[in-house]
Amino acid sequence: MARTKSAIKAIRVSGKKRIRGKAVRTATKTFVAKARESIEGKQVDAAKEAVTTAISQLDRAARKGLLHPNNVARRKSRLVKRLNPLVTAAPAPAATPKATKATRAAKATKGAKATKTTKAKK
């Protein structure tokens, strides 16, 4: 058992940190699990959103020093690796037509200011 004031305080502080850290770690695990479930359920939009929130939560845990940055990087990599085949298999949204040279030139001249002519010096 701790006897000195500093040791007693250290125990108190570490207990508070442990409780806060446990909450963040638990939330991180929950978000990662939800992301995996939505990926396995083949729900593309939900999976993208879930992976984004899971990555954010993992980064937060790393910032707070609860998880090692390499551990977080590995977990994020594995999540995205699972998500990529699902995203590439999904039909792409309709592409917008590209601007032709003529339309780009018209836009450029339309927005350009008229050049000032210089007056002849007397």
Image (spheres, grey):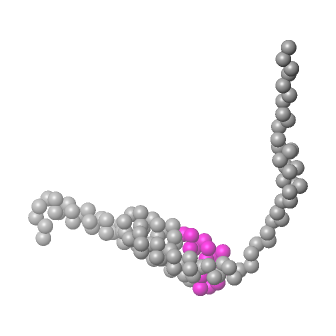
Residue in front for this viewpoint, 105 or 57: 105
Q: Which residues are magenta?
A: 39-53
Task: State whether the magenta stretch is mostly helix, strand or loop.
Answer: helix
Residue 86: quarter of image: bottom right
Furthest toward the left, the residue is 3
Q: Is residue 115 above or below residue 11?
A: above
The x, y position of residue 15, in whole percent, is: 27, 67
Q: Residue at the location (84% across, 33% down)? A: 115
Residue in front for this viewpoint, 11 or 109: 109
The x, y position of residue 34, in whole percent, is: 54, 78
Residue 22: quarter of image: bottom left
Q: Residue at the location (86% across, 57% down)? A: 101
Quadrant in which the C terminus appears: top right
Q: Residue at the location (39% across, 63% down)? A: 64
Left or right of 19 on screen, residue 98: right
Residue in front for this viewpoint, 7 or 97: 97
Q: Is residue 66 above or below residue 119?
A: below
